[in-house]
Image (cartoon, helix red, strand yellow):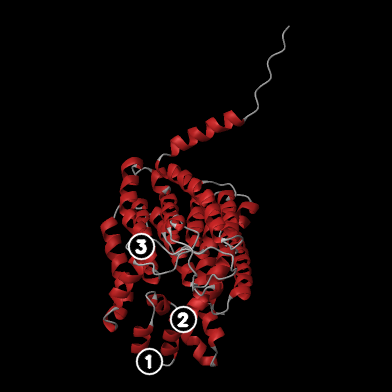
Amino acid sequence: MTQSMRKGVEQIDWAAVRPVALDAALAAVALVVLGWLKLHPGLDWREEAQPAVHALLAGHVHSFLTLAPIYGASLVLRAPFLLATKLSHSGDLAVYRASAIPCLMATGALAVWLSAQMRVKGSSTVARVLVLLVCAANPLIMWALKWGHPEELLSAAFCVAAVLCALRERSIAAAVLLGLAIANKEWAVLATGPVLVALPRARIRTLLIAGGVAAALMAPFMLATAGFTGQVKAVGTGTGTIFHPWQIWWFFGSFPHPHPGLFVFDPNFVYRLPPSWLGGLGHSLVVVLMPVLTALYGLVRHPRAGRARQDALLLLALLLALRCMLDPWDISYYWLPFLFALLAWEVVSTRRAPMMSLVATAVAAWTLQNHFAFDTQAAVFLVVSVPSLLALAVAVYAPDAGRRILAVSRRVAAPPEPAPASS
């Protein structure tokens, strides 16, 4: 070891490095356990991404670009890990696991970052451990891996990190992360409004950089495939016959209908088809609402104020919750980005343990499973999600009113004080 290297090692503040290393180790263990349980090629991976990945590994770049799904840019971001499997001549299982490694790493990095912010605030060890577990040991991670969509983790981490960077006035980092998130998965465009709200300045530059990063990653697919733009439009505005019970449109669907899809677990289930008028809305309704809701936030909360900028994470959580509730394809892992955004908001806003995110994770893990017949599942989902969404909207747009309502409800629920004894 040279003298300069020895001097550098001696200057490291090991007391500061040790807790970060412990956090990273805990997050890594949690993610390795989840990955080991569910890192098998899911149906969506085999049907959507695997043909393109095979072409890439065979060196057929043009075939890769034409075969890739609409989130093909995500495969470009993960290409170094995919190509590394060629060295060992690995099979499909190893290739899928390699594709998930950067997504799990991004999730772990977000968990360690949030825990470090809690440490700076002087939060308890229990609070920091809960932050790590809600982020890195979230059961919805397993479902994303099970269905073959590890890229969902990557966009979730990038979106939350982009808003956190914007809150720190790091506009270039926020722009790059936002662009990477959008290229990785198109729904991440919902983070655009919250990033702009969180930034005190340089908003136009941030939009241009983010758009440039996303366009650079998606351009090869547009150039190689004439119908790529049409494919994106078709997925964004059409629902086909996929119609899951965990969204607000379920009871508007027609029934009975023998569903040919994935969820035939019980012949007694009642299946429905999406209503014809919903086909034009598809997954795009919340994208249309995003600028409206962001503008409303700017109007009523004045984002230049510190608290309003900080609540940009809560605005992101609201938009991501609406994405799930309005999407006829809504499925368990769609809620993971919402939970990450809610967790980040709790970390930024308080020193306490993230109990709201913990409860939301537990409720989501129970609600978004096939416990009952589909109609019952849809009813339970609505009973849980609609009041929660309304409470979230109040917290975003009228936090003072929300605190007053909470104070009044506590007084009403409190037992009456005993009358003073007469003398």
The x and y percentages for residue 117 are 52, 54
Q: Amino acid at mark 3?
A: Ser
First of labels 1, 3 by sequence position: 1
Q: Is residue 120 left or right of residue 304?
A: right
Q: Secondary structure at mark 2?
A: helix
Q: Which residue is mark 3?
A: 276
Front residue of this view, candidates 128 and 344 = 344
For residue 229, which quarter of the picture? bottom left
The x and y percentages for residue 42 are 53, 77
Crowdedness of circle 2 by 10 Å Cα count: few (<14), some, many (20+)?
few
Q: Secondary structure at mark 1?
A: loop
The residue drawn where x is 56% and y is 68% is 143
Crowdedness of circle 1 by 10 Å Cα count: few (<14), some, many (20+)?
few
For residue 398, which quarter of the picture? top left
Residue 47 numbered mark, or none? 2
First of labels 2, 3 by sequence position: 2
Specify the quadrant that holds the C terminus: top right
For residue 189, which quarter of the picture? bottom left
The x and y percentages for residue 422 are 72, 8
Q: Amino acid at mark 1?
A: His
The residue drawn where x is 39% and y is 63% is 188
Q: Which residue is mark 1?
A: 60
Q: Amino acid at mark 2?
A: Glu
